[in-house]
Every structure is written in C-alpha cells, then in structure tokens.
Image (cartoon, rainbow, N blue to C red):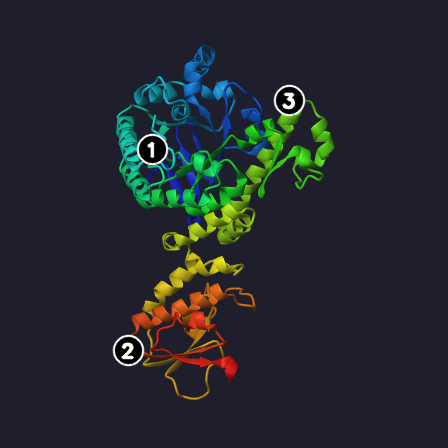
Amino acid sequence: MRECFEIRDTDAGGRIGELSVPRANVTVETPALLPVINPNLDTISPRRLADEFGAEILITNSYIIHGDDDLRERALAGGLHDMLDFPGAIMTDSGSFQLSEYGEITVTTEEILEFQHEIGSDIATPVDIPTPPDVPREQAERELETTQERLEIAEDVDTGEMLVSAPVQGSTYPDLRERAGCHAEGTDLDVFPVGAVVPLMNDYRYDDVVDVVAAAKRGLGADAPVHLFGAGHPMMFALAVAMGCDLFDSAAYALYARDDRYLTVRGTRALEEIDYLPCSCAVCTDHSPDELRALPDTERESELAAHNLHVTFAEIRRIKQAIRAGNLLELVEQRARAHPTMLDGYRTLLDHAAQLEQSDPVSKGSFFYTSHESARRPEVVRHHERLERLSVPDSLLLTEGSAPRSDEYDDSWRVEPPFGPFPRALSKSYPLTAEVPDRTDRAALAAAADGVARLVDVNPAADITLAHDGWPAAVLERVPDDVSLVDLTAA
C-alpha cells in the first residue's frame, strides 16, 4: 500500500480517498480540484481559493518561476506558501507543458526537482515527454522510454518529504499506457498523472480519454492516486472520476472568464448569449446577465472566474456524494446527455465494465435503470459472472411470471431484465432490487438473455426452460438452442 493515499469509499471506478501531503502537513480529500495559479496573474487569489471556495490544494508552474528573476528570488527567499499566501498543499509542474508547446526547455529533471524542493513545493513533477495523440508508434515508444528514464532519475533525487509525481505517457496506444502505468507503479514515486490528454479533450474525444485512462489504470496499483492532467471542465469530472481519477487541475475557470465564458455542468456559454443565470452561487444571485456584462473588464473577469469556480467545486462535492450514495454512474449518465461526445465517453467507459467491477461495491442503495446503457453496468457484469456459483437443479424453469403450481420442474427462478436469471431467495438482494421501467428496452432484454446463456454455459447438463413475456426474435437468438422457450403472452 502507498503510505500517502488511503481509499475510504468506492463506486464503479470512483473513490473518495485521503492524500497525505507530509511536507504541507495536510491531508487532501479526493476527488480534488487543483486550481491552476499563474504566478504572473491574480484573477482569484490563492488565499481566496482556500477561504471562500475551500480549495485544499492548488498547482502552479515551477518552470515559469525558475525562468523569472523576480519570481525566482521571491520563491527562494520565502518559499511558495508565503509567496502565494496559501495554507494548503501546493503542487508544481515542471515545464513539460512548455516543452509540448514550444519543443524545448532549459532545465533537466534533476535541476527542476531540486528547484521545486528549494522553493517549498509539496508535490513536484519531473520533466517528462508529453507525447501527443495519434503520433507514429515509434515516436510514442521512443518518448515513453525517455520519460521512464527520467522517472528513474527522479527516484534518485533527494526530495525529503516532498511527494513526486510519476507521469504516465504513451500517446493513444493502450498497451503503451498500460506499460507506462506498470513502470510508474514499480517506482517509489507517489502521484500518477495521466499526461498529454488535453488535445483529446480539446477535440471532444472523450471516448479516447476513457481508453487511455483505463489502460493506465490497468498498469497502476489499485491504491495509486491518479491525476488527470488538464481536465478542467466540470462537465467531464464525473466521467473521469468513474474511470478512477482522483485529482484534476483546472485553469478553465480563469481562461474562460477572460473570454467572457460562463461554465455550467452541461457545457460553456458565452456571456453575451445568456438571458438568465441558471445558478444560485453568490455571483449569479447578486447580478443579472446585463449587470455582469456592464462591469469593467477586470471586475467582470473576476466575477466570472468566481462563478466558474463555484460551479466546478460544487460538481466535485456532488460527485463525492454520489460515490457515498452509490449512484455515481447515474450521475455520469446525466452528464453524458449534455453532449454526444460525452455519451461516447460513457459508452466507452461501459466497455470497461469488467475492469470497473473489480472496485465496485457488491452492495449499494438502489440500482436505477435509466437508459439502455444501464444494461452494461458493472453490476450486471458481476451478476452474470457469479451465476457459476449457484447450484442448479436437473430441471429448471426461468420465468418472468409466477412460480408454477405443478411439480413439472425441480425449481423455478425469476428472470429480470437486465440481470437475467436468479433464485427467488435473492429477490431482495442488491442489485436485483433494481428500479426498472415497465417498458423494458431491447438492451435490458438482450442482457437478460445473455444471463440465461451464461447460466446454460456453466450448467450444460441442466434441462432449462425460459418463459418470457414476448421477447423479440433478435433477443431470443442470444439464448442457446437447447433451452426450451415458452411465450407467456401467447398463453
């Protein structure tokens, strides 16, 4: 177990955890947002981030500080915490972003880690190579090898109590991301950012983001704190948490405010297009859209940034409550309806349901079937896998109707879409207590048929009959041929 991170609650791939940051003498509850602080700008002060918004951790760029004589002298003289006036934990980036943007930086991994230690950073980052999406595989492999060499160098730098990140690269090659995760897990470094995903998010390629993170998670240990670099929009936080990400850095609150853009959990709106403010934060209750538009530029930017932060932190709290209540995937599904590419991301997440099932609790509150995607959730996967544990009699009726009064069968089990067959004694057990619409959709019926097929597969000698409520022919094709079929609607 990693001493700096403890997991308290889980749901799907999401978790509420505690990240201990010994140099700052604080414990950060995750999922956590790290507002990005540009040391040359002061849109929202770090002290205000802590006092008004409850920020426990932030991130700033040590490379910018290192390259500015005045900032460097101030940071070395008083330390980052005094310079920024922030009481929580401070993470620093290394210049890798500048490397990806401009192709060259002037520091080595040893130099920037030593500098981060000197200025009082609590979580430092080595100089990795952020390989963009879709590059030739040879480039991705070459640059991943360089990143891994630098992580090994980082292990040998004396950093005291300062935590050190181990970025996971590999472009859009899942096997390279998994390999990178395995390598990073094998180091004695502490926090694991999944890097170079900003171009994917900028292009709304949330499905590829999910595949990248899922691959990295397969390589990392279950107790590894995962940071999704550059994931700044609250619309996608629930999806990212459900993948298993714990930390998010965001400059979006300030960058969008500078462009007069207003954040919501369903997307971003230009201030000039808004007639009503759909939010109850202090900014939105104290101003009308016209009043916001009429403010001087600097004041308007500050007010919009504050609103953007309120929305962003509120979403983090909402996600934590969803994890605690066991309905994180239902929140993800709500967010997925905000944009077609978010729906692509959610559907891709469910492609990894078997992976999510490994951390998903066996029992929760209620399972709500709210769309055909619900038929692919980890709970359904788990039920199908566990059918092999059940004792099946020689002759078994699976029925959507009542138990037969005759002794024609040795036993009669229920069939409930999307789960499929189960003994009646389990009817009050999670997730078989699911709330399912009366108008069952094709996906739920298909999943139930797959459950029947699974039961037959692990009990080939049993004589099984399925009594169904008029399942379509395409669904019944999923049921093995040796199962006897009874259409209850034809009786």
Q: Residue 12's spot in the image, x, y percent?
A: 43, 52
For disc 1, the neighbor class at 10 Å (few under 14, some 14 to 19, many from 20) is many
Secondary structure at badge 1 equals loop
**383, above or below 309, in the image:** below
Where does label 1 land, which residue?
A: 166
For disc 3, the neighbor class at 10 Å (few under 14, some 14 to 19, many from 20) is few
| Residues at marks 3 and 2, CA–CA distance in whole angstroms | 76 Å
In the image, which is nearer the foreground, mark 3 or mark 1?
Answer: 3
Q: Residue 165's spot in the image, x, y percent?
A: 36, 31
In the image, which is nearer the foreground, mark 1 or mark 2?
Answer: 2
Where does label 2 land, which residue?
A: 461
How many numbered tags mark residues here? 3
Give the amino acid type for the residue marked by disc 1 in the picture: Ala
Give the amino acid type for the residue marked by disc 2 in the picture: Ala
**90, above or below 107, in the image:** below
**Mark 1 or mark 2: which comes first in sequence?**
1
Q: Of 136 and 13, which appears nearest the observer? A: 136
Where does label 3 land, which residue?
A: 298
Classify residue 258 as left or right of residue 76. Answer: right
